[in-house]
Image: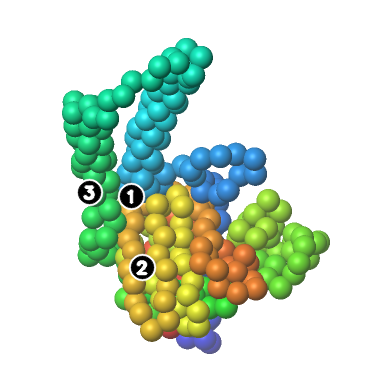
Amino acid sequence: MRLTNLFSGIAATAAATFAATAAFAQAATDNLTIKGAPVDGLMGFQPAASELASDVHRLDTMLLWIVGVITAFVVLLMLIVIVRFNRRANPNPAKFTHNSPLEVAWTVIPIIILVFIGSYSLPALFKQQEMPTGDIVIKVTGHQWYWSYEYVDQAVAFDAFMIGSGEGNLNETISGELAAAGYSDAEFRLATDQAVVVPVGAVILMQVTAADVIHSWAMPAMGVKQDGVPGRLAQLWFQPTEEGIYFGQCSELCGKDHAYMPITLKVVSQEAYDAWLAQAKVDFPA
């Protein structure tokens, strides 16, 4: 009798511990702020959540200033020419055909500008293309029209479908599914039933491919986008700097439901990731 009670107590404790772990894992990934999502009516980039994205934003700002200055200068020259050298103001045009200093200037100055741009853009490009050793390696496969994920070193694999997949418009059923997953109606066509979960500060190496046609895994807040080509294995990497929920989309036209294969990324603390991974190994064994 005492032995039976002992085993019953152990079983009850184990069940309670497992339930608590599962509940903690769920809470750890759900109680997050949405930081990377498109906003209706706004322009510009999503807030940068990785070093790669910050580099892209700085490069874009620099190029915008350079292009703006060049455009303003060219417009100013055109106005001067229109005002000072029209037929009325200058009835007898000059007959010269060469101006060596001017020709040297408009050759050398663009070269200097291009070298300056290259000195900033090439390091940013190389940083994106030189793959570091990943703390976490995730293989992502694009399908018509959903994503499959495999945590290569953790024996975890799952498919991620858009919440409300197959439904044309938002309705009460989809609203309930979104609410149950911790989202609002604003995240319809952005949120997926399963999310990629990674710890903040970890180097994430993703192996990207496709099972049928070309897809593209894009996460704007992380500054990454990579085509997935059937039969080939491409790579991208990022290192998230802020906890939160981030959304992406397939960015390669892949068929009639191309617009309905979003990406959800949840960046959590290391403790929350460990709890989620422990539960994922039970729920999503590879």
Residue closer to the observer: 115 or 236: 115
Residue depicted at 37% across the width and 30% down the height: 70
Residue closer to the observer: 80 or 70: 80
Q: Nearer the viewer, mark 3 or mark 1?
A: 3
Residue 239: image location, x then y, percent: 33, 54
Residue receiving disc 1: 52
Quarter location, residue 81: top left
Marks 2/3: CA–CA distance: 21 Å
Residue 112: image location, x then y, percent: 20, 35
Q: Are marks 3 and 1 in contact (CB under 8 Å)?
A: no
Marks 3/1: CA–CA distance: 11 Å
Residue depicted at 50% across the width and 79% down the height: 213
Residue 29: image location, x then y, percent: 51, 58
Residue receiving disc 3: 123
Which of the two labelled residues, at mark 3 and mark 1, occupies the earlier sequence position?
Answer: 1
Residue 42: image location, x then y, percent: 60, 39
As drawn, which residue projects farthest toward the top?
89
Q: Are marks 2 and 1 in contact (CB under 8 Å)?
A: no
Dot 3 falls on a residue whose secondary structure is helix
Which of the two labelled residues, at mark 2 and mark 3, occupies the earlier sequence position?
Answer: 3
Q: Is residue 244 above or below residue 115?
A: below
The amino acid type, in three-letter code, at marker 2 is: Met
Residue receiving disc 2: 206
The amino acid type, in three-letter code, at marker 1 is: Leu
Disc 1 crowd, CA 10 A, few/some/many (<14, 14-19, 20+)? many
